[in-house]
Structure formats: structure tokens, C-alpha cells
Image: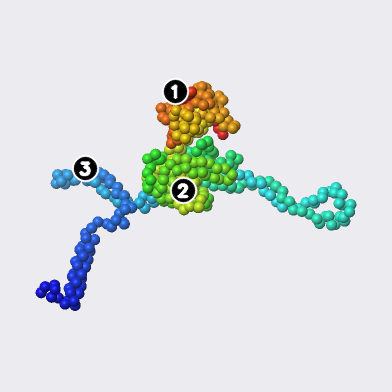
Amino acid sequence: MRMEQLSKTQLVLLVLLVSFMTSLVTGIVTVTLVAQGPVPITDTVHRVVEKTIEKVVPAEPQSATAAAAGSDGQEKEAVRVITQEDLVVETVSTVSPAVGSVIATKDIPVLERVYVDPFGENSPLKEFFPPDILRDFLVPQLRQNGTQKQEVSSGTGFFVSADGLILTNRHVVADTKATYTMILNDESRLDVDVLARDPIYDIAVLKVRTADRKFSFISFGDSDSIKVGQNVIAIGNALGEFRNTVSVGVVSGLQRTVVASGGASTETLQGLIQTDAAINPGNSGGPLLDLVGAAIGINTAVAEGAQNVGFALPINLAKKAVEDVRTVGRIQYPFLGVRYIVLNDRIKEERKFLVNYGALLVRSETDPAVLPNSPAAKAGLTEGDIILEFAGERVTEKRSLAELILEHEVGETVRLNVMRDNKTLAVDVVLGERPSQ
């Protein structure tokens, strides 16, 4: 029977039959593939496969047959599957003893309410009013009655050495009149001293006052090698109340610049790591960790009015701070001693310069272009000079003079290529130490 001879009813039944058979075969094939296939993707995307080499050591001498089989002393490869959750739990368990709350305490005046005679003993009003009336007319005043210790602020810190060195943010220990205590996860309280406050970055180095034991500490990672999308863990004293709060996220961005405000002061922070791991007030100074438990940043700031936008200082900045404290007892930075603007195409055209890069030394309303007795002054630099290169690298808007200076050491001799009166000359300068602010 040909297709044109089929009635409409027969044609519909035929289509339904073919559709049913197709669905049945598809279902059978799908079930078979699922049963024989690998673990679903949803179960594997968060897994990390760790390969270990195990040495098989027999408990007793084996027979010649077993030895011939090659089982004695052979190495075999064992595969252990670790989920991301396992890594986070293991990392947090390992590093938590090294993280604590940094508490600031001050002597706060104790005020009491007293009632005093506003007229005094020799008031002329007493001649016109009965004594009983004036005696009952008293006004309240506050009077100091000694002082008492009181916690005034809190943040987070973490050990970076077994002998009790601690990293935190400078703003956590900004009050020079306060005393500071580190409270660990086991509720032990340690008196700490502030060894150094970084003059440039929001970093401070503390030390346990009486280090009579070895402390668990967190190793440094390499913040220059982290990638956007990398998993991270933040630990801190959230809201100043919930000690060692853990949050997990990813690196959302690198080289961020933010203006951080606290109290009456503001500070521009550059080169920050952005993360969506929750960073709350009180988390400041805590570690930002990779999944192996190495510190890659110091939690520093959070964007107000946004969700899951936090920032951390790269840990490589803190490495220098710790090393300086160990070697010279303070954090030091190289210093040239100039004021400048960076040239670009617009300034070149406006001022008819020959170059569109470099640092033009200019004075401000209050400060000269070259500070007196500075390394720049001793090297002979003057107002109007253009520093084209610093240690062989061009000074540009992307690579500022300040950034290049920080890559060198105090006491180091650096060669500058300088343009003066449209002529270039080489100037050697010995970098000094940045004065304390």
C-alpha cells in the first residue's frame, strides 16, 4: 500500500506509532549511557584529584613467588579525590589557630552626674532671695571620677612566624595611646606591642610581648601569581563580635584602586585584590588565603552599598614590611625628594616639550620642586628637569616615578636619564629613607 492510498486516520495512527517507537528507543539508549557513563559534571566540577605515590613495604618477608611477581618494594600510584569543600575545611582547620582578634583598650574617663549651685557661695542673688529657695535651685553637671579600661575598637591579625610576629592593618592599631591584646581561638589573651606602622600602605607589624611558646603561623604565598577566578578564603573577626568567621569566594579583580575612609581621614589604596568573599567590619587585618592555606593578601576594605565587593592588600607588600622590621626594626622606604607631574600628549602640546613621557619637576603652592637636603637636591636635580628614565625604565602614566622608586632599596645608587633645556644627561642618585610622617 502506498502513502497516497492511506486514509487520514491511518496516516495519523502511523505517525503516532513511529513517534512512540522513537521515544522508547531514545529512552533505552539514554538510561544505558547514564548507567555506564562517568560521574555527572555537577559532581566533578568542584573536585580536585590528588595523586600520591605510595611505597609498598611488606610486613614480613614474602615468598619467592610473591617476589617474582614484583610486589616487594614496588611503587604504585594511588588516586585520592578531594572536593573543594574538603580543601576549605582542611585549610581553615589548619590556619585558625594562627588567626585572632586584635583588641584596642584605653583608659576612658568615668563620668558621674552631680548637682551644683550655679550661683556660688558669694552670689549677690542671695541678698534678694530666701536661702531655702536658692538651696533647692541646683543644676546637674558631669564630673570625672577616675578612669577605667575599656575596649574601644577591634580588628583581626594573624601570626606570620613562630616567635610571635603578627600582621594586621595599620588602621586597626592607629591609636598610639591605646594598648593592644590578641585574643586567639582558644580564648587565650596575649599582650602585643606595635613594632611598626607602614607609612605608605595600610600594614602594621605587631609582636607578642612575652613569647614564651611557639605559635602556629601562616606561610606567605605569592600575590604576583594569583589569577582572576582563583578560589580564596577570608578569615576575620566579623563585626568585632564573631571571631574567626570564614567566608569563601574568588578573586574578582586585580590592581584595584579605592579611596578608603575611616573616621575623619581618607586614604587612597592602590594595587588591591578584589574578592567576593565576604569582608565585614572587624575583618580588617585578617588573612586572604588560597586553598593550600598560604596568605596571599590582608583583608583591608569593603565597598559600602555593594554586596560581596571586598579588597585585600597583596601579601608581597607585607613581606617587605616584615623583613624590614626583622633587620632594621622599622619599615623603611626609599626616598628621592621631588614633586612632579607626569607628562602626556596633552601636556607635551601645551608646553611644547620634545617628549610625552617623564616626570616634570614642579613646585606646589607650599613646597619646592626639589626638597632641600634630599637625595634629589644632593644629586643636582632642579625645578624644570624632566626625569625620563629611572634605573633604565621609562617614567609614564602607567609606570609612575613613585612606583619605580618603591621597587628599589634605601641606600641604592640609581641612574636617572634627565632632560634639561632639551638636552639629556645621566644623573646618579643615592636613594635616602622616606621621612616618618
Could you tell me if residue 408 is visible in this image? no
Q: Is residue 353 above or below residue 78?
A: above
- Mark closer to the observer (2, 1): 1
Whole-number angstrom distance, CA of label 1 to CA of label 3: 71 Å
Whole-number angstrom distance, CA of label 2 to CA of label 1: 45 Å
1 or 3: tag closer to the N-terminus: 3
Asked which secondary structure carries label 1, the reply is strand
State the residue in front, 408 or 113: 408
Circle 1 is placed at which residue position?
424
The residue drawn where x is 80% and y is 51% is: 117
Which amino acid, mark 1?
Thr
Circle 2 is placed at which residue position?
310
Asked which secondary structure carries label 3, the reply is loop
- Mark closer to the observer (2, 3): 2
Q: Residues within 10 Å of mark 1 (few under 14, many from 20)?
A: some
The residue drawn where x is 53% and y is 41% is: 267
Circle 3 is placed at which residue position?
73
Which amino acid, mark 2?
Gly
- Residue 252 is tagged as none
Measured as percent of width and height from the top left, residue 375 is found at 51, 25
Which amino acid, mark 3?
Gly
Does 236 sit left or right of 7 as displayed?
right
Could you tell me if residue 130 is visible in this image? yes
The residue drawn where x is 21% and y is 68% is: 23
2 or 1: tag closer to the N-terminus: 2
Pointer 1 and pointer 3: residues touching (CB < 8 Å)? no
Whole-number angstrom distance, CA of label 2 to CA of label 3: 52 Å
